[in-house]
Amino acid sequence: MRYTAILEAQPGGGYHASRPALPGCHSEGDTLDESVANLREAIAVYLESLQARGEPFPVEDLFIKPLDVALPA
């Protein structure tokens, strides 16, 4: 399975990691690598839980596109 991860630097240090296609699936870590590893583990547990209940895995329909916004002069 492949899902997009959102990693956000936290004001006090470390990173928050989430998966938009898997509601409630979040993790964190002191470094980017730790955050990614923790999120991978959280995703695996999330998907195992769905599988145990006979529910389908979510299909990602997320598109990321940078937007330019003009500010008034």
Image (cartoon, helix red, strand yellow):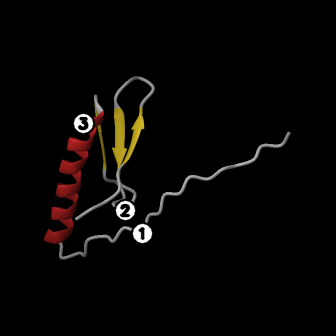
Position of 15 compared to 44: left or right? right
Q: Estimate the spatial distance between the alpha carbons at disc 3 and disc 2, rounded to whole Å.
A: 21 Å
- Which quadrant would residue 14 be assigned to in this image? top left
Depth check: give the residue in front, 70 or 49: 70
Residue type, numbered disc 2: Ala
Query: Comparing marks 3 and 2, which lies closer to the viewer?
Result: 3
Residue that extends furthest to the top in the rendered view of this protein: 12
Rendered location of residue 10, percent (x, y): 42, 30
Residue 33: image location, x then y, percent: 24, 36
Question: Left or right: where does residue 1 sit relative to residue 67?
Answer: left
Residue 7 at what x, y percent from top left?
38, 42
Tag 3 and tag 1, C-beta contact below 8 Å: no
Dots 1 and 2: beta carbons under 8 Å? yes
The tag on residue 33 is 3
The amino acid sitting under disc 1 is: Asp
Label 3 SS:
helix
Q: Secondary structure at mark 2?
A: loop
On screen, residue 38 above or below 19: above
* Residue 48, label in figure: none
Q: Amino acid at mark 3?
A: Asp
Residue at 41 percent of width and 33 percent of height: 9
Q: Quadrant of the N terminus?
A: bottom left
Q: Which mark is residue 61?
A: 1
Q: Closer to the camera, 39 or 53?
A: 39
Mark identifier at residue 21: 2
